[in-house]
Image (cartoon, grey):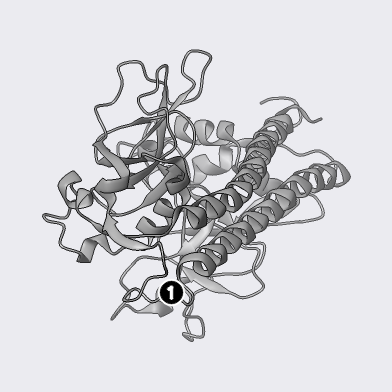
């Protein structure tokens, strides 16, 4: 055992309080990224009295698939309101919070090293599960309660800044939406367009191409060699798939998912590579970029005649679209660019802050 490290089992105990009176109906699951989320389980006709209650500062975890997922879904409840989880989950709490802080323990659970250690203990289980006894054998350092609080406070200060930035980004998105409505929705009659406006097609104002195969030069993370982002039709992280060394698209463009969740639009203002199931729309004139992205994101492609659950280039080419006059488009592009640039500054700050969080978690293993 490492110096100053002790088994988690010395500090926690299982809690098995059932929802016997059916007083609680909110059922939550545990995300693999270690937070509670609404359950997707169908509980119609299910006896919820068997489900386990989770109270504030209690933990729940799912030990069944650690070997498969290389991570252990585990989360702490910060809510003052009780909720229920699957009876297959373990619910536990800290025996003495004057010795070990719940927030400090949750920080330890978030460390990549903790997941690797948990995975190591699954070697003897063919199903990839982690036994409770083995979970309790995993070790952690337990400095003084004052030191723990210092570590937690430092982590929470960074987390609060990230949360504030996320709220600022949401406000910027709302501002952009309001700006679009002001220019192109409010007081605009589609049957009687203002002077200089007309109806046309996407193919008149933009080049439309399909994404290609995954590049042969590929990295899951940005490296010195691979700096160019690769985008797929995914929704997570705006479809970021990886990185390569040479761009395919060098102009400001809009990508739109052609399969799966059809019609998911993103504005790409830096060189990138699109791959299969993604369509790229590159306006001939740059002042169409922001407008086209906003306009396309509002179209119901799934109900507009696309076939076989996919969006095709011919379908997009003839897609009818309202075309405002150039002065309006240019003015909107200038204002939207200001918002977009501010958004990017905040996003970059949050990327750096998230790296700082990772460093703080790594630092826990060195605290005495």
- The image quadrant of residue 252 is top left
- The image quadrant of residue 194 is bottom left
Residue denoted by label 1:
188
Between 364 and 17, the one nearer to me in the picture: 364
Please report the residue visible at 40 percent of the width from the left and 78 percent of the height from the top: 48
Does residue 57 lie above or below 122 as drawn? below
Residue 83 visible to an observer of this rendering: yes
- The image quadrant of residue 291 is bottom left
Please report the residue visible at 47 percent of the width from the left and 82 percent of the height from the top: 20
Whether residue 289 sits left or right of residue 211 in the image: it is right
The x and y percentages for residue 201 are: 25, 54
Between 96 and 208, the one nearer to me in the picture: 208
Please report the residue visible at 22 percent of the width from the left and 62 percent of the height from the top: 302
Residue 10 visible to an observer of this rendering: no
Does residue 181 lie above or below 255 as drawn? below
The x and y percentages for residue 218 are: 37, 20
Quadrant of the rendering where the N terminus is positioned: top right
Between 295 and 115, the one nearer to me in the picture: 295
Whether residue 106 sits left or right of residue 223 in the image: it is right
Please report the residue visible at 27 percent of the width from the left and 47 percent of the height from the top: 204
Whether residue 263 sits left or right of residue 222 in the image: it is left
């Amino acid at each position: 055992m490492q110096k100053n490290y002790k088994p988690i089992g010395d500090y926690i105990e299982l809690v098995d309080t059932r929802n016997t009176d059916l007083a609680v109906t909110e059922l939550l699951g545990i995300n693999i990224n270690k937070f509670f989320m609404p359950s997707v389980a169908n509980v119609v006709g299910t006896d919820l009295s068997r489900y386990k209650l989770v109270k504030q500062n209690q933990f729940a975890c799912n030990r069944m698939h650690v070997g498969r997922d290389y991570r252990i879904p585990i989360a702490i409840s910060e809510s003052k309101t009780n909720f229920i989880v699957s009876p297959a989950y373990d619910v536990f709490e800290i025996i003495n919070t004057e010795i070990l802080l719940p927030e400090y323990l949750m920080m330890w659970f978030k460390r990549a090293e903790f997941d690797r250690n948990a995975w190591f203990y699954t070697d003897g289980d063919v199903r990839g599960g982690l036994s409770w006894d083995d979970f309790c054998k995993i070790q952690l350092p337990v400095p003084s309660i004052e030191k723990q609080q210092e570590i937690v406070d430092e982590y929470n200060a960074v987390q609060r800044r990230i949360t504030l930035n996320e709220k600022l980004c949401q406000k910027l998105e709302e501002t952009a939406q309001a700006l679009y409505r002001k220019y192109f929705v409010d007081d605009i009659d589609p049957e009687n367009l203002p002077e200089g406006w007309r109806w046309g097609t996407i193919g008149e104002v933009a080049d439309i191409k399909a994404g290609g195969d995954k590049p042969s030069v590929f990295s899951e993370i940005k490296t010195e060699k691979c700096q160019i982002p690769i985008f797929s039709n995914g929704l997570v992280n705006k479809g970021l798939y990886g990185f390569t060394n040479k761009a395919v698209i060098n102009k400001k463009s809009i990508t739109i998912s052609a399969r799966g969740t059809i019609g998911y639009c993103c504005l790409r203002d830096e060189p990138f590579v699109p791959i299969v199931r993604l369509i790229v729309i590159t306006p001939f004139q740059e002042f169409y970029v922001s407008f086209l992205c906003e306009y396309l994101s509002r179209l119901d492609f799934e109900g507009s005649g696309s076939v076989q659950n996919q969006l095709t280039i011919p379908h997009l080419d003839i897609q009818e679209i309202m075309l405002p006059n150039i002065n309006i488009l240019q003015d909107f592009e200038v204002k939207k660019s200001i918002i977009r640039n501010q958004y990017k500054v905040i996003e970059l700050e949050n990327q750096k802050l998230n790296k700082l969080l990772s460093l703080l978690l790594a630092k826990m293993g060195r605290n005495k």
